[in-house]
Amino acid sequence: MKSKILFVVSLLFGLMFINAGLNKFFNYMPVPKDMPESLIKAMTAMMQIGWLMPLVGVAEIVGGILFIPGKTRALGALVILPVMVGVVLTNIFIAPSGLPIALVMFAINIWAIIDNREKYLPMVR
């Protein structure tokens, strides 16, 4: 039962990041009409750096794909970690309304990292 729940959580987490990454290339999700002005300014500034959003999109897609299967979840969690830190910080300082879901996603990512900590030990030895 635990492995089925783990797979479903990992699948949903991975699919959310794959979707977010694909949206950076194809812009198929509408922008909410009630976005705070400060968030619009921040996103506009990030889009001015031509390579930043495609890089984040690729990291989200690759990390999401790697996060789904258990064998590559440890690598996927590390790939997604910098993106998650950015998401959480953006929600803390610019758009607090999205903070609850960002913290849940961050907790899932940290849980995956802690759950796979033995796989990281060879990197730090």
Image (cartoon, helix red, strand yellow):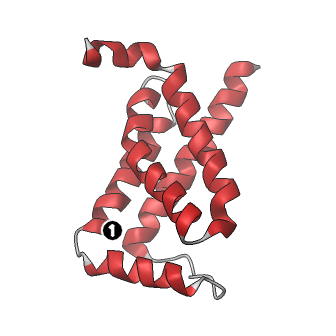
**101 and 3: which is toward the camera:** 101
Where in the figure is residue 51, as x and y percent of width and height?
22, 69
Where in the figure is residue 119, as x and y percent of width and height?
39, 16
Q: Quadrant of residue 111?
A: top right
Q: Residue at x 51, y 82 (%)?
A: 38
Count of marks placed on residues: 1
Q: Residue at x 65, y 64 (%)?
A: 98
Q: From what the image shows, is residue 77 above or below residue 49?
A: above
Q: From what the image shows, is residue 88 above or below residue 49?
A: above
The residue carrying mark 1 is 53
Q: From what the image shows, is residue 42 above or below residue 104?
A: below
Where in the figure is residue 23, as x and y percent of width and height?
46, 69
Few, some or many residues within 10 Å of mark 1 (<14, 14–19, 20+): some
Q: Is residue 106 left or right of residue 122?
A: right
Query: Tag 1: residue type?
Result: Met
Q: Is residue 43 left or right of residue 47?
A: right
Q: Residue at x 42, y 52 (%)?
A: 83
Q: Quadrant of residue 109?
A: top right
**91 and 75: which is toward the camera:** 91
Q: From what the image shows, is residue 78 above or below residue 38?
A: above
Where in the figure is residue 46, as x and y percent of width and height?
34, 74
**21 and 105: which is toward the camera:** 105
Q: Residue at x 62, y 82 (%)?
A: 32
Helix, strand or loop at label 1? It is helix
Q: Quadrant of the N terminus?
A: top right
Q: Quadrant of the C terminus?
A: top left
Task: Please identify the residue farthest to the right as the structure is shown.
Answer: 1
Q: Is residue 33 left or right of residue 70?
A: right
